[in-house]
Amino acid sequence: MLTITIPGVEVWDEAKQEFGSTKSQMLCLEHSLVSISKWESVWHKPFIGQTKRTVEETVSYIKCMTTTQNVDPKAYMMLTKDNLEDVSKYIDDSMTATWFVERKDIGTPPKNKEQVTSELIYYWMIALEIPFECQRWHLNRLLTLIRICNIKNNAGQKKGKKNPREILSQNAAINAARRKELGTTG
């Protein structure tokens, strides 16, 4: 969870013809599957994979990330450049000690062209039997868990498989044993 403080500012009130000030506002933010799901329901497009968001979309996502109750909607218009940088760093943080080695000598698998939406991530969670409490984890941590589950599940399937050379060798040994048992030459 990220906590940011939107500083209070002095503003001019046209109606009263006087200066006033706004209070500083502390926000607790959570970059999670829940937040992305809220944002996608507003914008009707995938959050993941979209490289550039408008200022309006970015502020909207910060609203979706907010767990603080009763925030003045005007507070979001007072976000500073530092606030936005802090949010960006938080979203980009892996939030895990796990890392993956991409093997270039073997070639990396082709990138999935599938649009990743919150519903697809929920499907992965269901298919991999990941509990729904994880939907509130930092999104990068959740995606790392999903990737590990896929790697471990695929590794278990590959262990039972033999390469073609092993299969031919095993079949040759079986045939030789049968020929010897039956006393034939072929």
Image: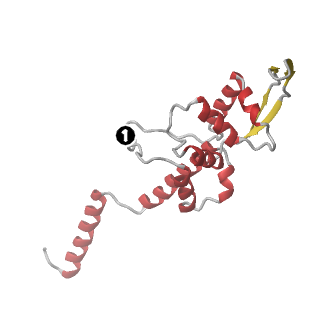
Q: Residue at x 13, y 74 (%)?
A: 185
Query: What residue occupies the far left of the structure in this picture?
Result: 185
- Residue farthest toward the front in the current orientation of the protein: 15
Q: How many marks?
A: 1
Return the x and y of residue 154 as percentages of the image width and height. 46, 56
* Residue in view at x 37 percent, y 37 percent: 105
Q: Amino acid at mark 1?
A: Gly
Q: Is residue 31 above or below residue 53?
A: below
The one of 19 and 77 positioned closer to us in this rendering: 19
Density class for disc 1 (Cα within 10 Å; few <14, some 14-19, many ≥20) is few
Give the structural element (helix, strand or loop) at label 1.
loop
Could you tell whether 119 is left or right of 77 in the image? Answer: left
Residue drawn at x 82%, y 32% is 25
Determine which quarter of the picture holds residue 176.
bottom left
* Residue 169 percent location from the top left of the image: 27, 62
Judge by depth and name the residue closer to the eye, 167 or 135: 135
Q: Which residue is label 1 attached to?
A: 107
Measured as percent of width and height from the top left, residue 121 is found at 55, 52
Residue 77, above or below 148? above
- Residue in the image at 71% along x and 29% along y: 77
Q: Quadrant of residue 128?
A: bottom right
Quadrant housing the N terminus? top right
* Along the viewing direction, whichever of 144 and 92 lies nearer the viewer: 92
- Depicted 68 relative to depicted 81: above or below: below
Which quadrant is home to the C terminus? Answer: bottom left
